[in-house]
Image: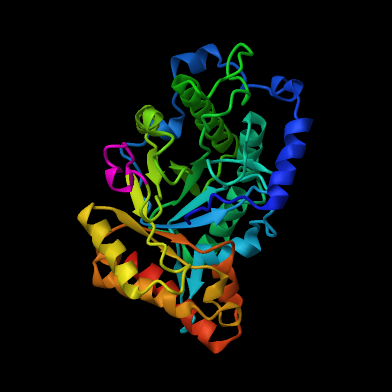
């Protein structure tokens, strides 16, 4: 969802505290990845990467925000289950999303994973902590893996493994004390090569953690660029894309409506770009606003994002009709039939819809889940 650039007072106050409390020793004490062994130097690909013949696609990809201290939920098996399967009104169970994007925009205590959310950039320690948060045995990817295992016992094998996409933080240009990736030398993000080096470190650490956890029912499919506009990162995108594609991972982007560079997504070297209509969040925006976004996506051969949050529930705003407008428009413009779709659902709105007792909420839930599951058939 499109961010705002106005910071709340409490975040500014937090920033001042952080600036005065963070010392040089804090970044100097961050441990880099273990140095590669001789065998790893000779062969930098994991077995799963060597066996992959093509980039994996994300046809129905749900966004799962997690990692910041401001989140009031944890992705355990119970919470993630409605994202894995759906039981229709006849009692038949279906596989839901084929792809799961884990991402975060700031730490919750004043440090940002992309430009514009909070004043202070997250450092290497924050980036590592984010990866470790995702790669657990019982939460996030671990919970997803377990939920899929349980579903397979009831339903059998899905047509293909469920896929995971991991958000890459933006190396923010103003930062010169992020951390080190080699020989203790502090990276300076005013230098493009240093920004690229930090992102490669992050990518390699996620690859390492995925192999260590050995999730049986998941594929690490790609990486998502958290910065929703190209303004501050144009100079480094092609290098990152080449690095990822060489490893057989996709480079994914979800630019907001009117974002700088959105329609240049191919030139920016993204493999998949899902365009945000940003229609749901402002009730004064007419249906023509959504239709124009669909027309632009078709014109520039983009995939698209459906957007909703808790306001879709009857008791939280009763904006469910706006979610229905997305589904109708996506069918009218051929998005549902021909393009990949990402799903922004606030924090845990789909879970809340799945448990709702209001008849209108339940009706909306079934309409939405049928929209997702039938598009995969």
- Residue 96 sits in quarter: bottom left
Task: Say if residue 163 shows up in the picture.
Answer: yes
Residue at image coords 68%, 59%: 73
Name the residue nearer the viewer: 306 or 214.
306
The spot of residue 256 in percent (x, y) is 41, 53
Above or below: residue 213 compared with residue 376:
above
| Residue 26 relative to residue 137: left or right | right
Name the residue nearer the viewer: 297 or 363.
297
- Residue 94 sits in quarter: bottom left
Name the residue nearer the viewer: 14 or 220.
14
The spot of residue 91 in percent (x, y) is 49, 81
The spot of residue 100 in percent (x, y) is 49, 53
Q: Is residue 263 magenta?
A: yes
Q: Is residue 173 magenta?
A: no
- Residue 242 sits in quarter: top left
Task: Say if residue 109 shows up in the picture.
Answer: no
Residue at image coords 35%, 71%: 374
Name the residue nearer the viewer: 310 or 12.
12
Residue at image coords 63%, 56%: 75
Above or below: residue 373 compared with residue 181:
below
Q: Quadrant of the C terminus?
A: bottom left
| Residue 211 relative to residue 333: left or right | right
Residue at image coords 75%, 29%: 22
Q: In the rendered structure, which segment of residues is drawn in magenta? A: 260-271
Picture mark count: 0
Above or below: residue 50 compared with residue 106:
above
Which residue is situated farthest in the bottom direction here? 359
Specify the color scheme: rainbow
The spot of residue 319 in percent (x, y) is 49, 78
Q: Main secondary structure of the magenta part?
A: loop
Which residue is situated farthest in the left direction here? 299
């Amino acid at each position: 969802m499109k961010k705002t650039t106005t910071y709340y007072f409490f975040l500014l106050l937090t920033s001042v505290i952080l600036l005065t409390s963070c010392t040089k020793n804090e970044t100097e004490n961050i441990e880099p990845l273990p140095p590669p062994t001789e065998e790893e130097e000779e062969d930098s690909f994991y077995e799963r990467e060597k066996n992959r013949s093509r980039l994996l696609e994300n046809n129905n990809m749900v966004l799962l925000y997690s990692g910041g201290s401001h989140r009031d939920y944890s992705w355990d098996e119970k919470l993630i289950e409605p994202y894995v399967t759906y039981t229709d009104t006849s009692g038949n169970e279906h596989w839901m999303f084929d792809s799961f994007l884990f991402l975060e925009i700031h730490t919750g205590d004043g440090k940002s994973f992309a430009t514009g959310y909070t004043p202070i950039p997250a450092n290497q320690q924050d980036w590592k902590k984010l990866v470790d948060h995702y790669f657990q045995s019982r939460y996030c990817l671990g919970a997803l893996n377990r939920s899929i295992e349980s579903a397979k016992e009831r339903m059998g094998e899905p047509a293909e493994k469920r896929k995971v996409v991991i958000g890459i933080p933006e190396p923010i240009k103003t930062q010169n004390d992020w951390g080190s990736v080699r020989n203790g030398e502090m990276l300076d993000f005013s230098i493009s090569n240093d920004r690229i080096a930090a992102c490669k470190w992050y990518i390699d650490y996620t690859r390492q953690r995925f192999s260590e956890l050995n999730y049986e029912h998941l594929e690490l499919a790609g990486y998502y660029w958290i910065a929703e506009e190209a303004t501050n990162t144009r100079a480094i995108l092609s290098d990152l894309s080449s690095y990822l594609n060489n490893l057989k991972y996709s480079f994914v982007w979800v630019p907001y409506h009117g974002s700088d560079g959105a329609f240049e997504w191919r030139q920016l070297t993204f493999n998949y770009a899902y365009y945000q209509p940003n229609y749901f969040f402002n009730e004064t925006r007419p249906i023509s606003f959504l239709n124009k976004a669909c027309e632009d996506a078709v014109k520039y051969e983009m995939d698209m994002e459906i957007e909703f949050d808790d306001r879709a529930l009857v008791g939280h705003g009763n904006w469910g009709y706006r979610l229905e407008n997305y589904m109708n428009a996506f069918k009218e413009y051929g998005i549902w039939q021909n393009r990949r779709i990402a799903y922004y659902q606030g924090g845990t709105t789909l879970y809340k819809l799945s448990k709702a007792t209001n008849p209108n909420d339940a009706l909306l839930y079934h309409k939405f889940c049928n929209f997702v599951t039938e598009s995969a058939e």
